[in-house]
Amino acid sequence: MKKGSHNNIEEKMSGGGGNSPSLDMEQFIKMADKEKIEFSIENDLFETLEKQWLEEREPGEPFDSWLNRTPVEALRRIELKGGGKVIDFAEYAKMKDADVKEINLA
């Protein structure tokens, strides 16, 4: 058996085919972040629409019928979630002096 014949890397391969430029990881990360943000917004919008549909629908009315009869202006005014509670990390990370209590063992 030849030494290093199976696990030897001879050259760096690109992220694509033979004529493709190498993969730019910074661009890849930006695209992934963009997709994550878009998914979050779309998910929030669908949850808000479902909640509004459940509150405003006629008994037994399907979602698409409710959506077709709802004015476009009402749909444009839908507010998405505010993003949750904002925590001031600097304030949160400050060490607080612990109260020292003495125990009388006598």
Image (cartoon, rainbow, N blue to C red):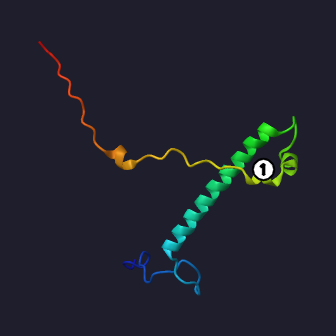
Q: Position of residue 9 (x, y in %)?
A: 43, 79
Residue 65 appears left or right of 88? right
What is the x, y in percent for residue 17? Answer: 59, 82
Image x and y of residue 11, in percent? 44, 83
Q: Taking 21 as reference, is 95 above or below it?
A: above
Kindly identify the amino acid type of the residue bearing the numbered disc 1: Ala
Is residue 6 shown above or below 53?
below
1 and 89: which is toward the camera: 89
Q: Would you say 29 lies left or right of 9 here?
A: right
Q: In the rendered view of the protein, which quadrant contains the N terminus?
A: bottom left
> Mark 1 — residue?
74
The residue depicted at 17 percent of the width and 19 percent of the height is 103
User: Based on the displayed image, in which of its 4 quarters is residue 91 positioned?
Assistant: top left
Could you say which is closer to the camera, residue 77 or residue 95?
A: 77
In this rendering, would 79 be left or right of 72?
left
Q: Is residue 3 above or below residue 93?
A: below
Instruction: Quarter of the image for the C terminus: give it.
Output: top left
The residue tagged with tag 1: helix, strand or loop? helix
